[in-house]
Amino acid sequence: MSGLGSHERFLCRLTISSLNLLKVVSEQEGCTIEELNAGRLCDWFLKDKLKREQNIESAVLQWDDPELQF
């Protein structure tokens, strides 16, 4: 990544992080990454949010900053 500019490094890190999360989602949903679609991803985010509300340790996404409410 040393040959990349700051914007390219950011996009590269974002893409790698997204790929890693897609791998987790596909594993938890019992499908391949290629089978994921917007609906499945939204469903997974809702499930992970419920896990976070019930027990922070069981959720994949671990943010708890009230300022990050979407």
Image (cartoon, rainbow, N blue to C red):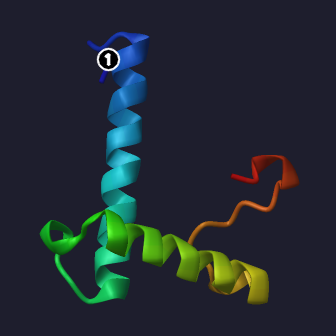
User: What's the amino acid at mark 1?
Assistant: Ser
Horizontally, residue 44 falls left or right of residue 70, namely left
Horizontally, residue 36 falls left or right of residue 70, namely left
Horizontally, residue 65 falls left or right of residue 47, namely right
Horizontally, residue 61 falls left or right of residue 21, namely right
61 vs 13: above or below? below
- x and y percentages locating residue 8 in the rendered image: 33, 19
Between residue 22 and residue 69, name the one nearer to us. Answer: 69
* Residue at the far front in the pictured view: 39
How many other residues sit within 10 Å of disc 1, few (<14), some (14-19) or many (≥20)? Answer: few
Which secondary structure, mark 1?
Answer: loop
Q: Which residue is drawn at 33% across and 46% down?
A: 16
Q: How many marks?
A: 1
- x and y percentages locating residue 65 in the rendered image: 83, 54
Quadrant of the rendering where the N terminus is positioned: top left
Q: Which residue is drawn at 13% across and 67% down?
A: 34
64 vs 57: above or below? above
Residue 3 lies in what quarter of the image? top left
- x and y percentages locating residue 9 in the rendered image: 38, 23
Residue 22 lies in what quarter of the image? bottom left
21 vs 1: above or below? below
Q: Mark 1 points at which residue?
A: 2
Q: Residue at x 32, y 32 (%)?
A: 12
- x and y percentages locating residue 40 in the rendered image: 34, 74
Q: Which residue is drawn at 16% across and 73% down?
A: 35
